[in-house]
């Protein structure tokens, strides 16, 4: 089937999409009973004017803390509405166009994707390779598998334009989209098509699983971030009828597509904006939480950065659109919450700056209190908030994921600035193969932050070693540890992937 | 957690494994399984050799006692010198602990004598036995390597060494706490008569050593119930375990009935201890929690050091983040519960009596905490060399803490009564009089200076004809009552007599008047 019989995408799925025992819905609702009073306890204390230390730093802290609170409450609210949909087989034989948009990806990666698409059961499947890279090897590959091949004369609108173009060349009532690296399970359509019996459903989204998470550090951390989204968050969004399309592993209804004129081509996250259009038109969306396709996550830091930059730019530029959208408040709030996530890098920058300012002799945001008083108010809220992430993610969200995200705080900062300045971005396909050399350049902003934190700590300790200095140096050490953990994959020598024994997906099933 | 199925080559072992039941392997993992990621465990011979070395080192560190007897110890020594009947009577009306340690001390005094070392022998032995017991618990839960690392930590643990040298019951509580957990795990794996007997004995010893042993015993009941519910739900045969558990509960209740009456009388007829290290006694705060955590790991440090250690609390945020997504086995869950819950319960109890949140009262969890750290080392770090380096690093910090605890005169737990009394005796004559504060100091004087004339300071200033020289021997001056009484008497003596000198030893003040 594939030129790489040991391809990781054939391995057994190790992620348990839905926790076996207590549902996330119950977990989060129970913990919220603690979390909400603790949040009120902390913010009631923090927002008291008596807490103001250095006024401008206090103001900045409040903004960061309120942002985090909004994110936390949004997360709890979303997860508390978890809905776990069952697979639903088709009730009638229909035709499905399967689109595999490609743009200069290695043919050996696309090979397995196409082969898997051909093997889809449960419908009259018509597979199309949508080649935007004018690659003859891709044409040969399509011919080899006996599938359709579409190449555009004019490459406008990146992936969105590519799919829109293909819509004009095909006519099946349903369209499945898989990124070039996503290997569909044979029963993908058998699990999703039944949901289309409801004529109001525009699309059925499924998880974007990274099969290389066990063989690559960056892919693992990246997947851990994805797992929280495609786990508790996506199921919660489904419970609020607010699932948005993620661009791959998704089944569309052609009439829904046509009702909004296809994918918007003026966005870096065309799927996000398409979903807003569809929901505005009254279409519904469905999320099936089972892994029904396995792809490849970014294998090096540069690829991760490129992916995150695209997502951050796209979602932040989509924020005004979400705010303007004529949607029920729940839906609008869900879109805004998702978009706002890409502002969280600012909070990392803010929290890192506090020990630096303090150690350099500056002020501190909160004044007139001691550590026990702060901890008495902060610790319960922090513990519950962290436990919520751990329990909602059923252990899938890892320190590696957190560190990778924190170390790339600058992406969010830069994306915000570019968005505010309305600087245009370009659609960059996430590389499918890891680099073979170290990539310090990809983490330079984080390394610069580490250098500043270390230097300031040394300076602070040289001045004096009282408890206040030790406390701020400990904060600096906390940030340095997180940043270095997030940068580590870019700094270490890449290891060659070792082919070895594995449990095939089919056998595991 | 990845588990490695035991080899099926040994038919006897396989048969025993089957007899134990698959659910046990599922519940706690195969006994003595390999460490994670398939690296070979430490061999049995090497483990025994290393453990023997650790026991010898641990014993040597426990035998090196740089301090004298302090107040609580002197009370225990006084009780041990009474007749058995009087000792029980004294305990019943004048103390706040069950009698197991006192009984042992009573026998020790009559067999080994009254020297400081002899009096410390029960604690030293119990404290040293914690090392192999924790190794065994680590081996039972995880593997030999984890057990060895945990044993290495407790061998040099400053706090455990401190209480292994104290003529009090805390080393007993630690030892029997570890043994209670160990025997409970064995009972869960194999509910044989022998294992049940060992479990019942260990919990009884724990219970009769200190009332706070109940904190762990309570957690153990929850563990039993959890295991029984789990087996019931999964359709396993839970009846043998349930039957044995019912017997053990019955025996526990039979012990509790007399003990509750005993304790009730003790607590209604006595008051709290005279004093505790600063930071814990005055108020219950996060600082008190952090300070006690720092002490649990690095032993009693001067207040300035403790303050700096507590200021490092942001590193706890790092630890909490590192735990994200790590998952945990049922073993670690049980160990974590047994470590955290007693401390939390004690915190709750401390809301009613703030003096109760003190590290010595949850000393029982300190070895468990070290076992968790050992598991963290073997579970999170892949390379054995790196494991060794991290273990050595942790031990180095413990040894620094130990040196500081044992030698620094600013240790808040150090009361140098021995040094003070030796200086008093050097100047004392046949007409000398020692006024002491607080009143329980009489037991210290009874031990170190049995032939001197002495009197409670709160009985007033001696007449001019009474005693010369007069010594005021005072401690616990952070207690306002004791401070005021001492200040008043010293002032009066200053007025009526000539002050010859005044000197201090650790947390002790002496004034000499003619």
Image: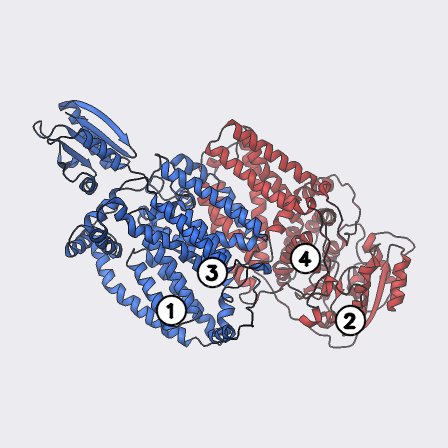
The Cα atoms of the two marked residues, 2 and 3, are separated by: 50 Å
Q: Residue at x 13, y 23 (%)?
A: B496
SS type, badge 2: loop
The quadrant in which the N terminus of chain B is found is bottom right
Residue A52, visible in the rendered structure = no
Q: In the drawing, does residue B222 fall left or right of residue B208?
A: right
Specify the colour of chain A.
Answer: red
Badge 2 or badge 4: first in the primary sequence: 2
| Mark 3, secondary structure of its residue | helix
Does mark 1 fall on the same chain as mark 3? yes
Q: Nearer the viewer, residue A39 or A408?
A: A408
The residue mark sitting in front, 4 or 3, is 3
Q: Which mark is residue B29?
A: none
Q: CA distance from mark 3 to mark 1?
A: 17 Å
Q: Farthest residue toward the left?
A: B465
Image quarter (top left, top right, bottom left or bottom right) of the C terminus of chain B? top left
Residue designated by label 4: A213
* Label 1 crowd bin: few (<14), some (14–19), many (20+), radius 10 Å: some
In 3D space, how far apart are the residues under numbered discs 2 and 1 (Cα atoms)? 58 Å
The answer to whether mark 4 and mark 3 are in CB contact below 8 A is no
Q: Which residue is mark 1?
A: B195
Q: Are marks 4 and 3 on the same chain?
A: no
Query: Helix or strand or loop: what does disc 1 sit on?
Result: helix
Residue bearing mark 3 = B139
Q: Where's residue B83, x and y in %?
A: 15, 54
Q: Nearer the viewer, residue B102 or B152?
A: B152
Q: Nearer the viewer, residue B481 or B145?
A: B145
**Which tint is chain B?**
blue
> Which chain letter matches label 4?
A
Q: Which residue is mark 2?
A: A120
């Amino acid at each position: 089937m594939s030129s790489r019989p040991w391809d990781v995408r054939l391995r057994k799925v190790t992620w348990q999409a839905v926790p076996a025992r207590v549902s996330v819905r119950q977990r989060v609702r129970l913990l919220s009973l603690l979390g909400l009073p603790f949040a009120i306890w902390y913010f009631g204390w923090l927002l008291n004017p008596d807490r103001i230390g250095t006024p401008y730093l206090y103001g900045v802290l409040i903004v960061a803390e309120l942002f985090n609170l909004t994110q936390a409450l949004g997360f709890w609210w979303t997860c508390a509405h978890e809905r776990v949909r069952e697979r639903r087989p088709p009730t009638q034989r229909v035709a499905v166009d399967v689109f595999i948009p490609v743009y200069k990806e290695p043919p050996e990666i696309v090979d397995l994707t196409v082969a898997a698409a051909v093997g889809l059961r449960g419908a009259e499947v018509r597979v199309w390779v949508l080649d935007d890279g004018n690659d003859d090897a891709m044409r040969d590959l399509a011919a080899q598998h006996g599938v359709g091949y579409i190449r555009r004369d004019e490459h406008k609108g990146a992936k969105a334009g590519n799919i829109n173009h293909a819509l004009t060349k095909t006519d099946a009532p349903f369209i499945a989209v898989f990124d070039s690296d996503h290997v569909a399970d044979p029963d993908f359509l058998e699990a999703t098509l039944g949901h289309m019996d409801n004529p109001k459903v525009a699309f059925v989204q499924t998880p974007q699983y990274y099969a290389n998470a066990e063989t690559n550090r960056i892919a693992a951390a990246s997947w851990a971030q994805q797992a929280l989204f495609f786990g508790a968050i996506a199921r919660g969004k489904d419970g609020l009828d607010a699932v948005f399309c993620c661009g791959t592993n998704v089944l569309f209804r052609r009439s829904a597509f046509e009702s909004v004129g296809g994918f918007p081509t003026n966005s870096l996250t065309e799927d996000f904006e398409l979903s807003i259009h569809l929901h505005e038109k009254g279409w519904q969306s469905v999320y099936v939480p089972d892994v029904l396709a396995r792809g490849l996550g970014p294998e090096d830091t540069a690829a991760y950065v490129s992916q995150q930059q695209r997502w951050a730019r796209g979602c932040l530029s989509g924020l005004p659109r979400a705010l303007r959208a004529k949607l029920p408040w729940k839906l609008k709030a869900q879109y805004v919450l998702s978009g706002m996530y890409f502002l969280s890098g600012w909070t990392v920058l803010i929290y890192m700056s506090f020990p630096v300012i303090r150690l350099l002799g500056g002020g501190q945001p909160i004044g007139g209190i001691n550590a026990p008083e702060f901890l008495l108010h902060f610790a319960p809220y922090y513990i519950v908030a962290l436990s919520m992430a751990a329990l909602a993610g059923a252990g899938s969200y890892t320190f590696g994921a957190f560190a990778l995200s924190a170390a790339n705080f600058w992406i969010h900062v830069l994306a915000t600035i570019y968005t505010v300045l309305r600087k245009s971005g370009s659609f960059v396909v996430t590389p499918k193969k890891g680099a073979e050399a170290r990539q310090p350049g990809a983490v330079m902003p984080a390394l610069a932050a580490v250098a500043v934190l270390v230097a300031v700590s040394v300076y602070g300790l040289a001045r004096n070693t009282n408890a206040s200095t030790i406390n701020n140096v400990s904060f600096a050490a906390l940030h340095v540890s997180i940043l270095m953990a997030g940068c580590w994959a870019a700094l270490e020598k890449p290891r060659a992937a070792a082919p070895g024994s594995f449990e095939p997906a089919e056998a595991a099933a | 957690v990845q588990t490695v199925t035991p080899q099926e080559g040994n038919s006897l072992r396989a048969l025993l494994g089957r007899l134990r039941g698959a659910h046990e392997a599922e519940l706690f993992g195969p006994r003595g399984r390999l460490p994670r990621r398939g690296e070979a465990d430490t061999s049995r011979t090497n483990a025994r050799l290393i453990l023997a070395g650790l026991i010898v080192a641990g014993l040597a560190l426990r035998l090196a006692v740089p301090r004298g007897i302090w107040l609580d110890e002197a009370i225990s020594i006084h009780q041990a010198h009474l007749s058995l009947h009087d000792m029980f009577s004294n305990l019943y009306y004048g103390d706040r602990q069950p009698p197991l340690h006192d009984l042992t001390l009573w026998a020790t005094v009559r067999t080994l004598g009254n020297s400081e070392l002899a009096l410390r022998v029960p604690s030293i032995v119990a404290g040293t036995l914690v090392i192999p017991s924790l190794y065994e618990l680590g081996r039972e839960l995880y593997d030999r390597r984890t057990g060895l690392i945990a044993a290495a930590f407790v061998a040099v643990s400053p706090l455990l060494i401190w209480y292994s040298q104290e003529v009090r019951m805390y080393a007993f509580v630690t030892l029997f706490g570890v043994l209670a957990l160990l025997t409970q795990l064995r009972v869960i794996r194999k509910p044989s008569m022998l294992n049940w007997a060992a479990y019942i004995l260990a919990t009884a010893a724990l219970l009769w050593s200190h009332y706070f042993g109940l904190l762990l015993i309570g957690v153990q009941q929850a563990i039993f119930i959890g295991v029984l519910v789990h087996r019931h739900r999964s359709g396993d045969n839970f009846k043998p375990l349930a039957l044995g558990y019912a017997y053990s509960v019955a025996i526990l209740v039979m012990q509790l009935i007399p003990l509750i009456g005993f304790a009730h009388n003790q607590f209604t007829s006595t008051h709290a201890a005279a004093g505790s290290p600063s930071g814990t006694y005055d108020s219950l705060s996060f600082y008190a929690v952090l300070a006690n955590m720092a002490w649990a790991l690095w032993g009693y440090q001067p207040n300035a050091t403790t303050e700096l250690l507590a200021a490092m609390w942001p590193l706890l945020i790092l630890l909490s983040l590192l735990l994200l997504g790590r998952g945990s086995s049922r073993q670690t869950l049980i160990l974590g519960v047994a470590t955290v819950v007693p401390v939390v319960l004690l915190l709750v109890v401390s809301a009613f009596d703030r003096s109760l949140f003190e590290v010595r009262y949850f000393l029982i969890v300190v070895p468990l905490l070290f076992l968790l750290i050992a598991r963290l080392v073997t579970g999170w770090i892949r390379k054995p060399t790196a494991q060794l380096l991290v273990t050595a690093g942790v031990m180095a910090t413990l040894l620094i803490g130990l040196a500081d605890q044992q030698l620094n005169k600013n240790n808040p737990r150090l009361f140098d009564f021995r040094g003070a009394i030796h200086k008093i005796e050097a100047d004392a004559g046949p007409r000398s009089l020692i006024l002491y504060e607080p009143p329980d100091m009489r037991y210290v004087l009874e031990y170190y200076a049995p032939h001197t004339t002495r009197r409670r300071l709160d009985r007033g200033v001696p007449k001019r004809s009474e005693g010369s020289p007069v010594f005021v021997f005072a401690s616990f001056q952070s207690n306002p009552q004791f401070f005021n009484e001492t200040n008043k008497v010293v002032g009066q003596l200053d007025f009526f007599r000539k002050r010859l000198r005044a000197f201090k030893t650790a947390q002790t003040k002496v004034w000499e008047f003619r």
